[in-house]
Image (spheres, grey):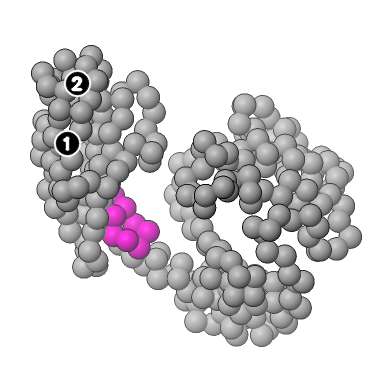
């Protein structure tokens, strides 16, 4: 939590990403930013700061902005991702950090006074990783709030967390052709090397569609799930094992066809 603003913030740690698209996607030769969602390239970095702002925040940012249909977050009744979107921010050529015109869902408070760099480094002294400790000091100094140190501590705990072992799929066997539209999927319990309790999500999707986490559901009972499927289609399925601390492991993927 971030008490000063009365909100929660997330520290996202990305390592060995295979992403080629999106805000953190690959940057092709001759370009300074990733491609837009339609594949368009923005070319080399403009000399004008105003043009850079437009490309980063108005073109690239809006191109990849999540919508109510694509967001993976749950929202309170009557709200959606649009409720937390402030299209006018950041202001191009702004003279101050004051945010104007924010909807009620976006808390606005005066910025805290910066913390001296040396003091911020001392506040972040418990962070073991040198690079992470440096980023912590920069954030604390610039934003003027020692509460951010807790976020970096949580990240450090999570990065030392090992992934759970993958679950072994039991049935149906791979490439099964089912004569029944009612199919029961089963898998073995998995363990966690750090001793954390694990949970499972069963993922099932048509083979002619791409996999997304929307295809995954927490099963009841614990190690199986029975689903009624339309005839004449082939499906893929797997199980995600999660340790409740941000780490998850995919099982193998199997195919099943309903005749």
Say which residue appears at 38% left-offset and 39% top-offset: 214
Instruction: Determine whether the residue tagged by mark 1 lies in a helix, strand or loop.
Output: strand
Number of marks in the rendered image = 2
Residue pointed to by mark 2: 257
Tell me the quarter of the picture where residue 42 sits: top right
Residue 60 horizontal/vertical position (percent): 68, 39
Q: Is residue 22 visible?
A: no
Coordinates of residue 90 in the picture (x, y in percent)? 77, 52
Q: Which residues are magenta?
A: 242-249
Residue density around tag 2, few if under 14, some if 14–19, many if 20 or more, within 10 Å: many
Q: Which mark is residue 21?
A: none
- Left or right: residue 166 compared with residue 213: left
Of pointers 2 and 1, the one earlier in the residue sequence: 1
Percent coordinates x, y for residue 32 in the rendering: 70, 40
Q: Find residue 203 and report its horizontal and vertical position in percent.
A: 28, 38
- The residue that label 1 is drawn on is 226
Most frequent secondary structure within the magenta stretch? loop
> As drawn, which residue projects farthest toward the front?
78
Whether 61 is drawn above or below 174: the answer is below
Q: Is residue 244 magenta?
A: yes
In this view, 205 is above or below 127: above
Which quarter of the rendered picture does the C terminus lie within?
A: top left
Q: What residue is drawn where x is 40% and y is 64%?
A: 159
The answer to which image quadrant residue 30 occupies is top right
Q: Residue sitting at 86 percent across and 56 percent down?
A: 94
Name the quadrant containing residue 144.
Answer: bottom right
């Amino acid at each position: 939590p971030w008490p000063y603003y009365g909100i929660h913030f997330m520290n996202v740690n990305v390592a060995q990403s295979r992403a080629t698209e999106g805000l953190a996607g690959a940057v092709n030769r001759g370009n300074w930013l990733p491609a837009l969602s339609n594949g368009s390239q923005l070319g080399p970095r403009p000399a004008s700061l105003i043009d850079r702002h437009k490309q980063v925040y108005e073109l690239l940012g809006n191109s990849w902005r999540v919508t109510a249909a694509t967001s993976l977050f749950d929202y309170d009744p009557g709200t959606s991702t649009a409720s937390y979107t402030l299209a006018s921010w950041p202001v191009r050529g702004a003279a101050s950090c004051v945010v104007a015109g924010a909807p009620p869902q976006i808390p606005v408070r005066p910025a805290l006074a910066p913390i001296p760099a040396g003091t911020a480094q001392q506040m972040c002294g418990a962070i073991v990783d040198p690079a992470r400790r440096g980023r912590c000091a920069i954030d604390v100094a610039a934003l003027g709030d020692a509460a951010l140190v807790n976020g970096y501590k949580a990240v450090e705990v999570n990065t030392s967390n090992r992934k759970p072992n993958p679950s072994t799929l039991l049935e149906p066997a791979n490439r099964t052709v089912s004569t029944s539209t009612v199919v029961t999927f089963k898998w073995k319990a998995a363990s966690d090397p750090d001793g954390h309790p694990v949970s499972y999500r069963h993922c099932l999707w048509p083979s002619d569609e791409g996999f997304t986490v929307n295809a995954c559901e927490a099963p009841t009972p614990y190690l199986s799930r029975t689903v009624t499927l339309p005839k004449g289609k082939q499906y893929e399925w797997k199980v995600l094992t999660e340790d409740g601390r941000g780490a998850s492991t995919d099982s193998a993927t199997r195919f099943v066809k309903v005749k």
